[in-house]
Image (cartoon, helix red, strand yellow):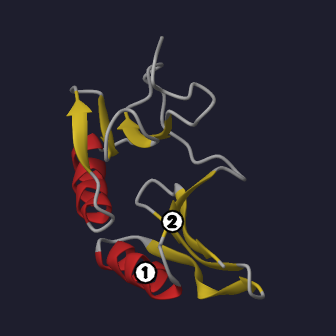
């Protein structure tokens, strides 16, 4: 028997054509969220607080084809507050991400969010509910 809730998200993977650059970007970005590099190989690196919780993996595609950012595919990170969302958004931009939607209230009194794209065009959201 496991203490893990197997219905929870284990990890999300984003492809990278330049793994070293992607690891540098996500190391700096996730450190500001209290995450760290959990493990890695020459092809894939996992970031999170532990492997028992949801994690983010950056990898070179197994089929050795070019990675692509899917339309409608996005990874969302809790910001903790509107100010936390703003800080993560600014951090990502300072690391070379591009704006894909400036911080703002998207659903009144419910959802505050900001959107960026990393160097591989993967879409990230920083959000706060409430």
Residue that sits furthest to the top in the current view: 1
Q: Is residue 2 visible?
A: yes
Residue 18 vertical position relative to residue 97 in the rendered view, above or below: above
The one nearer the camera, 58 or 10, is 10
Residue 125 vertical position relative to residue 44 in the rendered view, above or below: below
Q: Mark 1 to mark 2: distance in Å?
A: 8 Å
Task: Determine the residue positioned at 22% across, 26% down.
Answer: 41
* Residue 60 % position (x, y): 37, 32
Mark 2 element type: strand
> Relative to residue 31, is residue 117 drawn left or right?
right
The one nearer the camera, 104 or 100, is 104
Task: Determine the residue positioned at 47% across, 72% down.
Answer: 79
Q: Label 2 near label 1: C-beta < 8 Å?
A: yes
* Residue 11 % position (x, y): 48, 36
* Residue 55 % position (x, y): 42, 42
The one nearer the camera, 35 or 18, is 35
Q: Residues within 10 Å of mark 2 (few under 14, many from 20)?
A: some
- Which quadrant holds residue 84? bottom left
Task: Determine the residue positioned at 30% across, 44% down.
Answer: 18
Q: Residues within 10 Å of mark 1 (few under 14, many from 20)?
A: some
Residue that sits furthest to the right in the current view: 108
> Relative to residue 13, is residue 95 drawn left or right?
left
- Which quadrant holds residue 75? bottom right
Quarter of the C terminus within the rendering: bottom right
Give the number of callouts: 2
Task: Determine which of the numbered discs, if any, sits on residue 78 in the image.
Answer: 2
Residue behind mark 1: 84
- Which quadrant holds residue 29? bottom left
N-terminal label among 1 and 2: 2
* Residue 23 % position (x, y): 26, 48
């Amino acid at each position: 028997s496991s203490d893990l809730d197997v219905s929870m998200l284990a990890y999300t993977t984003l492809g990278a054509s330049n793994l070293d650059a992607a690891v540098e970007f996500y190391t700096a970005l996730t450190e500001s969220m209290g995450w760290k590099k959990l493990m890695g190989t020459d092809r894939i690196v996992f970031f999170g607080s532990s492997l028992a919780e949801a994690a983010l993996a950056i990898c070179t595609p197994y089929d050795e084809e070019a990675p692509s950012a899917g339309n409608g595919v996005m990874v969302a990170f809790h910001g903790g507050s509107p100010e936390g969302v703003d800080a993560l958004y600014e951090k990502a931009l300072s690391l070379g991400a591009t704006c894909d939607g400036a911080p703002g209230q998207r659903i009144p009194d419910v959802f505050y969010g900001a959107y960026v794209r990393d160097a591989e065009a993967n879409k990230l959201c920083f959000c706060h509910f409430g």
